Image (cartoon, rainbow, N blue to C red):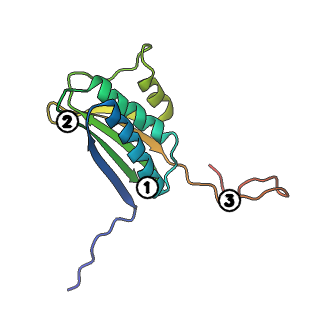
Amino acid sequence: MKQKSLEPTTPFRNFSIQLSPTPRGARLARLLATEQLRSWGVPLDPARQVIAELSTNAVTHGRIPGRDFRLFLYVVADTLRIEVTDTRDDRLPALSDTGRGLLLVDALANRWGVAPGLPPRKTVWAELDLAPEPKNLVSGGAGGLPEGPQR
């Protein structure tokens, strides 16, 4: 009897990297993630701003010397999920008037939150809905509107 293998019908892409909890590590997270998103053909903005803010927060507020932070990127269907895991589960992020990082994440992401991990870890995550690139753009004549149904 021949069995069918179950293959996902939705493409799933992921990227993960562990980095030092330093300003250089946060910068490297943004740069490497930008290159990964570019290779996947995913729009860079606002994703790179969200990645930069979450990585900087991990370095600034989630740092314990000798304990790295981890960046995960997942693309499933039309959603990019960004996760940054640090080792300070005792310091949960909150929106405040004093810092702009999470205010930017809140403004740019479609959804975001915090998930507990194995002690002493926590993960701050954000999801961005990826709009499909407009196709069949015409210029002039018909007013330069894209062809096909629009959301």
Q: Which residue is mark 3?
A: 148
Count of labels shown? 3
Q: Amino acid at mark 3?
A: Gly
Q: Amino acid at mark 2?
A: Gly
C-alpha distance separating marks 1 and 2:
25 Å
Say if 111 sits above or below 72 in the image.
above
C-alpha distance separating marks 3 and 1:
20 Å
The image quadrant that residue 91 belongs to is top left
Which label belongs to residue 77?
A: 1
- Mark 3, secondary structure of its residue: loop
Q: Which mark is in front, 3 or 2?
A: 2
Residue 112, position in %: x, y? 39, 34
Q: Which residue is mark 2?
A: 117
State if disc 1 and disc 3 touch (CB < 8 Å). Answer: no
Question: Which residue shows up at 32% across the image and 69% down it?
Answer: 7
Q: Which mark is in front, 1 or 2?
A: 2
Viewer-proximal residue among 10 and 29: 29
The image quadrant that residue 60 belongs to is top left
From the viewer's perspective, tell me whether residue 111 is left or right of residue 18.
right
Residue 27, position in %: x, y? 38, 36
Going from the N terminus, do you reach mark 3 or mark 1 first? 1
Q: Amino acid at mark 1?
A: Ala
Circle 3 Cα neighbour tier, 10 Å, few/some/many (<14 / 14–19 / ≥20): few
State if disc 2 and disc 1 touch (CB < 8 Å). Answer: no
From the viewer's perspective, tell me whether residue 116 is left or right of residue 56.
left
Viewer-proximal residue among 50 and 114: 50
Q: Which mark is in front, 3 or 1?
A: 1
Question: Which residue shows up at 36% across the image and 58% down it?
Answer: 12
Going from the N terminus, do you reach mark 1 or mark 2 first? 1
